[in-house]
Amino acid sequence: MADKTLRLILGDQLNSNHSWFAKTDHSITYVMMEIRTETDYTTHHIQKIAGFFVAMRQFADFLKSKKHHCIYLKINNKDNLQSFDANLSFLIQRDHYTKFEYQSPDEYRVDLLLKNFTTQLAIASEIYDTEHFFSTRGELEKFFEGRKSFLMESFYRAMRKKHHILMSGDDPMTGQWNYDQENRKKMPKNHKPVASAGFQQ
């Protein structure tokens, strides 16, 4: 049996620049789903739900336009079992996928759900970074491993060096890493704020 991979894309992972989409691979199928477990676990404004669904549908259309295989389950689809684990289990069994992959969810609740789901799978699974942030999920823990001091400033500096943000070689562009001390100064005692243009009391 040829290898077949099912990749889940969540509604807040609509990043067309993600490395997943750099090339088309017909052994990979992407799946996106509108499900009641996500709309109903707490009260959401209807416009928020509608906005997510519109963005997801447009992203699915984008993937298809780039010749990626994509399954999209709308909220009222008769085959929609209305939860991640139920839909994924059904698709994996129906289409005989040999591997399941997903990007790390930003929400702990979904992260835990998918981790539990993969422990029950009979096929291989793999988690990818969302590539949304400058740092990866485990980078902070690794940076402070074995250290006695946990100053966030040191991590910020490492990130600036790594990604060359406001840097001149290995030094900060302005000669200072930050201006925290200046920002902590109290406002002068007799200071009078300048009125904003057009502001009327």
Image: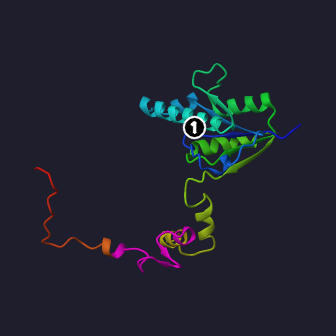
Mark 1 neighbour density, 10 Å: few (under 14) some (14–19) many (20 or more): some
| Front position in the image: 141 or 182 | 182
Q: Residue at x 81, y 32 (%)?
A: 96
Q: Residue at x 58, y 21 (%)?
A: 76
Render colour scheme: rainbow
* SS at badge 1: helix
Q: Is residue 56 visible?
A: yes
Q: Residue furthest right?
A: 1
- Give the left or right position of residue 198, taking residue 30 as reference: left
Q: Is residue 45 visible?
A: no
Percent x, y of residue 98: 81, 39
Residue 73 location, quadrant: top right
Image height of 75 relative to 135, above or below: above
Q: Residue furthest left?
A: 201
Percent x, y of residue 140: 58, 64
Question: Looking at the rendering, in which quadrant would you find the N terminus?
Answer: top right
- Give the left or right position of residue 189, taking residue 97 as reference: left
Residue on which disc 1 sits: 59
Q: Residue furthest top?
A: 78
Image height of 39 relative to 3, above or below: above
Residue 198 within the magenta-colored segment of the rendering = no
Query: What span is colored magenta in the figure?
Result: 160-181
Q: Residue at x 47, y 30 (%)?
A: 50
| Front position in the image: 164 or 91 | 164
Image height of 163 relative to 49, above or below: below
- Give the left or right position of residue 78, taking residue 185 as reference: right
Which residue type does callout 1 highlight? Phe
Percent x, y of residue 179: 36, 74
